[in-house]
Amino acid sequence: MGTPTPVRRLFLFDIDGTLITSGGAGERSLRMALQRYFNIVDDLSMVEIAGRTDASIAHRVFEIHGIENTPENILGFFDSYLQCLAEELPLSPGRLLPGIVQLLDALKANPEVALGLLTGNLERGAKLKLTHYGVWQYFEFGAYADDHRDRNALGPFA
């Protein structure tokens, strides 16, 4: 018998409201993408955003506006959203939440800890946000809206 493999503890983090606040960049980017890609102006007041995955939000927006839920429409909308997000992040009054860097540093220093993301963001959106705020490199893996539209189904992906 060899040396037993050490057990690692898994810490999964959400992004918005847990690690950062984007200053509204995400929601503004969704509205901008809807206008740019589909030429539809909507304040998204009929769409529940908090706690939803980006995929679920897109599905609801498409449903409200009678947009066909095709792979081309989804891909085009998400590409537009991510472009808008890259533009909006530097213009927004967002920030890392207090104590996050110290917490991540302490956890990362522990070899028995694995850090991951479990978020409703698309992976590319998560990377944009966390790179902008300087903490993307802390996370080894993640479960994202790309993996499943239902946030409650993301756990097994992590």
Image (spheres, rainbow, N blue to C red):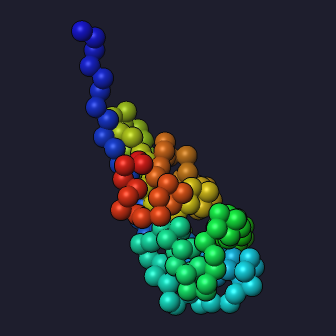
Q: Residue furthest left?
A: 1
- Residue 25 appears left or right of 104: right
The one of 36 and 87 positioned closer to us in this rendering: 36
Indicate the position of residue 8 as horizontal and vertical percent values. Answer: 32, 35
The one of 10 and 44 positioned closer to us in this rendering: 44
In which quarter of the view is residue 151 placed?
bottom left
Q: Residue at coordinates 53% horizontally, 68% vertically from top-left?
A: 54
Q: Residue at coordinates 75% horizontally, 85% vertically from top-left?
A: 39
The one of 152 and 111 positioned closer to us in this rendering: 152
Indicate the position of residue 127 as horizontal and vertical percent values. Answer: 59, 55
- Visible residue check, residue 147: yes
Q: Residue at coordinates 30% horizontally, 23% vertically from top-left?
A: 5
Q: Residue at coordinates 49% horizontally, 71% vertically from top-left?
A: 56
- Visible residue check, residue 90: no
Indicate the position of residue 103 as horizontal and vertical percent values. Answer: 39, 52
Above or below 49: residue 156: above
Above or below 139: residue 124: below
